[in-house]
C-alpha cells in the first residue's frame, strides 16, 4: 500500500461560513490490475502507518474503521468486492466518511453527452480515466464525475450526495491519495492533478501527461507466483511480494490554488 499527499495543510472553514468548505479537484488516474483500489482523500494527518492494505485501501484498520474521530473524507475507486464493507460489486466508485462502508456508491460509469446515457468504465483496464470531485459548501453537495481521458466532462455526475463537511473537517486538512493491493500485484498511477479552494480546479494540458510504461522484470524479482501461503482476497494480511503500489504525481501538471 502507499500514500501520496500535497505536502502542506490546506485551510478549510477559515471564515466559519459554508462556502469556506468548498473545493474542487480533477485528476487523471490509471489502475492496471484489480488489486484493491485507489482513493482520493482529505485527512487531518498524513500519518497512515497504522493503516492496513487490501480491502482497507491503506486508510483504516480493524480497530479504527468507522470511527467518527478519523475525520476522513475519501472517494474510492474500488476494484475488489469486499462483502464486509457491503461493496456493491468489484468495479465501483464510493463516497466514504470515516470508514469503508460507503455512504453512496455506484458501478463505475460516465454519462455520455452525445448518447445521453451512462456508459460503463472498467477501473482496472489501465486506460487513463479522469475524475472530478467537487464540493459546494453553500449547497452542501458533493459531486463525483468520471470520464475517459479523451472525453469532455459529462453534464451529470456519477455520484451526488448532500453532506455537511463541517462535521468532518478541521481547520486544516491534507489532501492526497492512497492505494493498496492484495493477492494481485497492481500499479496505481496518478499522472495529473489539479486542486482548488477558489472556484473550479484549473484544467491541465493533457498532452503533458506521462505515458505509462510496462513494469520491468526487476519489479518482480522477489515475486513468487507459486507461493502456497496466499491469503484469501478479502484478507488484510497479504504476501508482501504481491503488494506493489506505484503512485506517480507529475509535478509539472500538479496545480494548486488555496
Image (cartoon, rainbow, N blue to C red):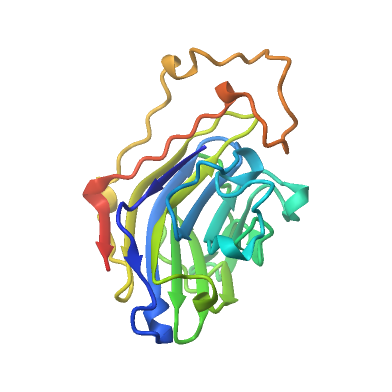
81 w.r.t. 164: above or below: above
Q: Residue shown at 27%/53% (left/top)?
A: 254
Residue 81 as seen in the image, left or right of residue 182: right
> Left of 62 or right of it: where is 202?
left
| Residue 221 drawn at (x, y percent) | 48, 12
Residue shown at the point (51%, 43%) measured from the top left: 179
Look at the picture and state if 70 lies above or below 14. above
Dividing the picture into quadrants, the one containing residue 246 is: top left
Residue 150 visible in the shown view: no
Label tally: 0
Query: Can the viewer see residue 123?
Result: yes
Q: Nearer the viewer, residue 184 or 96?
A: 96
Residue 46 placed where, x, y %? 42, 50
Q: Residue furthest left?
A: 252
- Left or right of residue 227: residue 256: left
Q: Residue at 60% across / 49% down in the picture?
A: 60
Q: Quadrant of the C terminus?
A: bottom left
Left or right: 220, with 232 as reference point: left
Amino acid at each position: 500500500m502507499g500514500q501520496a499527499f500535497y505536502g502542506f495543510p490546506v485551510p478549510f472553514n477559515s471564515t466559519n461560513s459554508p462556502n469556506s468548505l468548498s473545493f474542487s479537484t480533477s485528476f487523471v488516474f490509471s489502475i492496471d490490475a484489480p488489486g484493491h483500489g485507489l482513493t482520493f482523500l482529505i485527512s487531518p494527518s498524513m500519518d497512515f502507518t497504522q493503516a492496513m492494505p487490501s480491502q482497507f485501501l491503506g486508510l483504516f484498520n480493524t480497530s479504527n474503521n468507522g470511527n467518527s474521530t478519523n475525520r476522513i473524507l475519501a472517494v474510492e475507486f474500488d476494484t475488489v468486492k469486499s462483502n464486509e464493507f457491503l461493496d456493491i460489486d468489484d468495479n465501483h466508485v464510493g463516497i466514504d466518511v470515516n470508514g469503508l462502508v460507503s455512504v453512496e456508491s455506484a458501478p463505475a460509469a460516465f454519462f455520455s453527452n452525445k448518447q445521453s446515457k451512462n456508459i460503463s468504465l472498467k477501473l482496472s483496464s489501465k486506460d487513463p480515466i479522469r475524475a472530478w470531485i467537487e464540493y459546494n459548501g453553500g449547497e452542501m453537495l458533493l459531486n463525483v464525475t468520471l470520464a475517459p481521458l479523451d472525453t469532455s466532462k459529462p453534464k451529470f455526475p456519477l455520484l451526488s450526495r448532500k453532506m455537511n463537511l463541517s462535521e468532518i473537517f478541521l481547520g486544516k486538512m491534507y489532501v492526497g491519495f492512497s492505494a493498496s493491493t492484495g493477492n494481485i500485484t497492481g500499479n496505481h498511477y496518478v499522472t495529473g492533478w489539479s486542486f482548488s479552494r477558489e472556484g473550479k480546479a484549473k484544467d491541465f494540458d493533457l498532452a503533458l501527461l506521462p505515458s505509462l510504461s510496462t513494469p520491468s522484470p526487476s519489479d518482480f524479482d522477489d515475486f513468487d507466483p507459486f507461493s502456497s501461503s496466499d491469503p484469501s482476497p478479502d484478507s488484510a494480511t497479504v504476501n508482501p511480494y504481491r503488494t506493489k503500489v506505484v503512485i506517480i504525481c507529475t509535478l509539472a501538471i500538479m496545480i494548486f490554488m488555496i
